[in-house]
Image: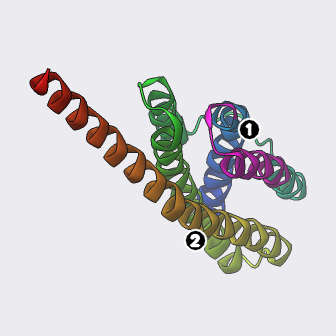
Amino acid sequence: MPDQGLKTLYIDELKDLYSAENQLVKALPKMAKAASSAELREGFEKHLEQTKGHVQRLEKIFEALGENPKGKKCKGMEGLIEEGSEAIQKDYEGSVLDAALIGAAQRVEHYEIAGYGTVRSMAETLAEDDHVSLLEETLQEEKETDEKLTELASQINTEANADENEEQSNTQHKKKVRRVA
């Protein structure tokens, strides 16, 4: 009987991930559009296609369970997406905006990694071997995306810092010119 309680929790967690992934399908195009870096934009577009695949994998699991994936709203993902939207609406530009987008995207990835790690562990305990492989595949893709974002962040953060230093230098030069004149 204890497995019945865990199975109910497992299904609830899967529904949460299903909601999260579907929210992300809507948010990723906006993030891609806001990105100034072509590499970051392409990364968001690629992850959108992966995310659609994540939704399909979850649908396979729900079908095997004879369950409906709908009926739950993932409030955690809703909040993370809202934070990402706030970054887009601020006055950030260029590489600074890209750095903000990467930060938002990595928070999303870490949330998903935690969620998929949790349900994969539950699936193992429940002896849902077919589910384990599907969930593991998604978990690995989420980890790879996080690693790519980390690599990209290193480059983009350096650019953002260089742009800021150049801007500060130009401002200081203009102040000196005004004092001399």
Residue 151, placed above or below residue 106: below
| 83 sits to left or right of 142 | left
Q: State the residue at coordinates (62%, 46%).
A: 16
Task: Kindly identify the amino acid type of the residue bearing the numbered disc 1.
Answer: Val
Q: Position of residue 20 (x, y in %)?
A: 63, 43
Does any portion of residue 172 appear in the rendered image?
Answer: yes
Q: With 11 as the anchor, is 79 left or right in this view? A: left
Residue at mark 2: 2
Residue 13 percent across, percent down from the top left: 61, 54
Q: Quadrant of the C terminus?
A: top left
Q: Position of residue 67 (x, y in %)?
A: 81, 47
Spatial distance from mark 1 to mark 2, Cα to Cα?
Answer: 35 Å
Give residue 35's mark: none
> Counting residues from the N terminus, which is met first, the one under dot 1 or under dot 2?
2
Q: Residue at x 72, y 38 (%)?
A: 22
Report which residue position mark 1 lands on: 25
